Image (cartoon, rainbow, N blue to C red):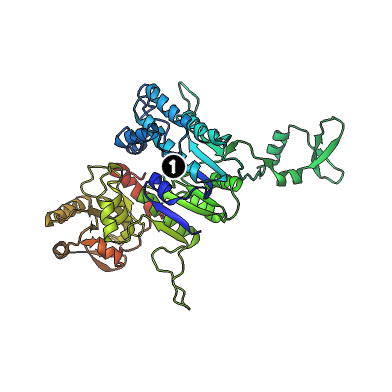
């Protein structure tokens, strides 16, 4: 099987592209945060996560999709749902009300039902969630898995370190929940975790340390009859480690982590390594239906598993592609052709749902769903810049600026400085010179070096008009660039990509960009 990345709604993709009983292991980490206002059920805590709250509202809200999903569950025509599941969701409506939380549970129920369908009889499912919804999700999972011969295996507690805070009304929250369910005969590879030190081993064993005449340290393993005593040498015990339990102490991604990609909800690779090693073997197929920044994909690749990743945002798809390129040397910008035979070599990753021609780009631009209305902007900016720009996620109030990047330059004193580059995207057929004037005005106001006007439709009149804004001279490379360039979708499909001095959002320039983004553009 060729590894696959799907760009689109995971419910549609699970239903239309993933075969029944074809997946060995599925892990999902849906976008969900604990500090939410669930009407009468929960109270919001603080204001520190407003940006994430907006992301949550955009994803889970009581709207036509939620109503449609509820109708699908209640009409009884979905054969992947159990009667217990239908009764559960119906019974929760008068308890929770028709709100964001209920929309979330309906959405997850439909997706978990499909995940159950596509899992092999030996398959396992790990659902990553938090304390706000884990109890409701467990009911859904019981109704879908246990009522069909599956089993609840573990509630895994992912415990992580953090700042010590003095809280007035409750203890500090430092864990997530991972619900582990399986079908009838799951693959499970038990393994041990190395002891971090001699002290940790002795604390776990709660036994005295002895020493042989030759200086080898050991503890005594007392048998059940209380009479036999067996020496366990310290060096062997430290190598062997301790069997893994359901409380996992693994640090979160922090600002200094080498894994850090700038993705808010990025999970550490060590967490996914443990899951993938435990519930799959080499060559098995691992699926992540909420792929995010691609940690599951990257770890599955490293552990010689086959994999499928799905995400609805192009920012995530772009980040996954760049991660695969950086970590494994994949090149997604060139055709793979055998030099001797001149035959096309099958790509290591099959990418589905990403525009590959004008019509598919037009279809993306014309999506009416408010949740995906900015996806065309993300796709064209990240594609044109080869994933080196930062997309403006804010809806409205962006002054027509849909993305930005920084480029290196030198000032009049020959000092190294960073210059802003702006991107403005238009998908309409009506394109007027006034749009270029507006872009130029914002660039002048913010002292941006140059700008790119990215369009769905060809705009030859604007290409000619753009030259009146003159050129930008970069002292670092001693080269002239048009101050405003007009690029259409067809240009990109013909191989025209961003040509500017080094832009790399993974280097030190990213920190500068994020400071600016903090004011008007959020990385989500």
Residue 164 percent location from the top left of the image: 50, 31
**Residue at (42, 49) in percent of width and height:** 310
**Residue at (78, 33) in percent of width and height:** 208
In the rendered structure, the answer to whether residue 180 lies left or right of residue 476 reads right
In the rendered structure, the answer to whether residue 311 lies left or right of residue 468 reads right
Specify whether residue 48 is in view.
no
**27 is higher (above) or lower (below) than 246:** below
Q: Quadrant of the C terminus?
A: top left
The residue tagged 1 is 265
Residue 396 percent location from the top left of the image: 23, 42
Residue 472 percent location from the top left of the image: 22, 63
Picture quadrant of residue 60? top left
* Nearer the observer, 302 or 60: 60
Residue 314 percent location from the top left of the image: 35, 51
* Nearer the observer, 360 or 402: 360
Specify whether residue 137 is in view.
yes
- Label total for image: 1
* Nearer the observer, 237 or 95: 95
Mark 1 neighbour class, 10 Å CA radius: few under 14, some 14 to 19, many 20 or more:
some
**Residue at (71, 47) in percent of width and height:** 239
**462 is higher (above) or lower (below) than 173:** below
Q: Determine the secondary structure under disc 1.
A: loop
Picture quadrant of residue 435? bottom left
**Residue at (21, 49) in percent of width and height:** 400
């Amino acid at each position: 099987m060729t590894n696959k990345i799907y760009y689109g709604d995971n419910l549609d993709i699970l239903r239309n592209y993933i075969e029944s009983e074809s997946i060995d292991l599925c892990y999902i980490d849906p976008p969900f945060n604990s500090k939410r206002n669930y009407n009468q059920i929960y109270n919001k805590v603080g204001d520190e996560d407003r940006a994430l709250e907006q992301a949550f509202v955009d994803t889970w809200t009581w709207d036509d999709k939620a109503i449609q999903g509820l109708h699908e569950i209640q009409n009884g025509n979905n054969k992947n749902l159990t009667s217990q599941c239908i009764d559960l969701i119906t019974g929760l409506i008068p308890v929770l009300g028709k709100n964001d939380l209920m929309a979330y549970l309906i959405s997850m129920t439909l997706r978990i039902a499909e995940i159950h369908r596509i899992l092999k009889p030996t398959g396992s499912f790990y659902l990553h969630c938090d304390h706000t919804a884990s109890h409701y999700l467990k009911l859904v999972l019981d109704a879908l898995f246990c009522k069909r011969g599956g089993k609840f295996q573990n509630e895994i507690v992912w415990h992580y370190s953090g700042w010590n805070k003095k809280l007035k009304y409750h203890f500090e929250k430092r864990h997530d929940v991972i619900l582990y369910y399986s079908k009838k005969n799951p693959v499970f590879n038990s393994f041990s975790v190395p002891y971090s030190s001699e002290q940790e081993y002795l604390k776990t064993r709660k036994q005295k340390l002895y020493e042989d005449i030759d200086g080898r340290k050991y503890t005594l393993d007392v048998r059940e009859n209380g009479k036999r005593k067996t020496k366990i040498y310290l060096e062997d015990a430290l190598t062997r480690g301790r069997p893994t339990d359901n409380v996992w102490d693994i640090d979160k991604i922090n600002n200094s982590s080498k894994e850090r990609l700038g993705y808010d909800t990025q999970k550490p690779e060590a967490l996914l390594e443990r899951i993938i090693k435990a519930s799959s073997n080499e060559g098995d197929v691992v699926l992540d239906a909420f792929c995010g920044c691609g940690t599951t994909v990257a770890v599955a690749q490293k552990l010689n598993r086959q994999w499928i990743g799905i995400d609805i945002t192009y920012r995530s798809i772009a980040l996954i592609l760049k991660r695969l390129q950086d970590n494994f040397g994949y090149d997604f910008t060139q055709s793979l052709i055998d030099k001797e035979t001149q035959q096309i070599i099958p790509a290591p990753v099959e990418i589905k749902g990403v525009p590959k021609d004008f019509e598919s780009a037009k279809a993306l631009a014309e999506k009416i769903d408010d949740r995906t209305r900015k996806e065309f902007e993300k796709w064209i900016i990240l594609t044109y810049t080869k994933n080196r720009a930062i997309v403006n996620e804010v809806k409205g109030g962006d002054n027509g600026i849909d993305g930005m990047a920084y480029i290196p330059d030198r000032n009049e004193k020959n000092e190294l400085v960073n210059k802003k580059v702006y991107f403005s995207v238009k998908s309409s057929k009506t394109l007027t010179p006034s749009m270029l004037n507006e872009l130029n005005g914002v660039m002048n106001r913010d002292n941006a070096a140059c700008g790119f006007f990215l369009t769905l439709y060809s705009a030859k009149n604007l290409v000619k008009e753009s030259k009146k804004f003159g050129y930008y001279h970069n002292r670092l490379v001693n080269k002239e660039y048009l101050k405003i360039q007009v690029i259409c979708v067809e240009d990109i499909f013909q191989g025209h990509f961003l040509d500017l001095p080094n832009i790399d959002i993974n280097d030190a320039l990213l920190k500068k960009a994020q400071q600016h983004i903090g004011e008007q553009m959020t990385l989500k």
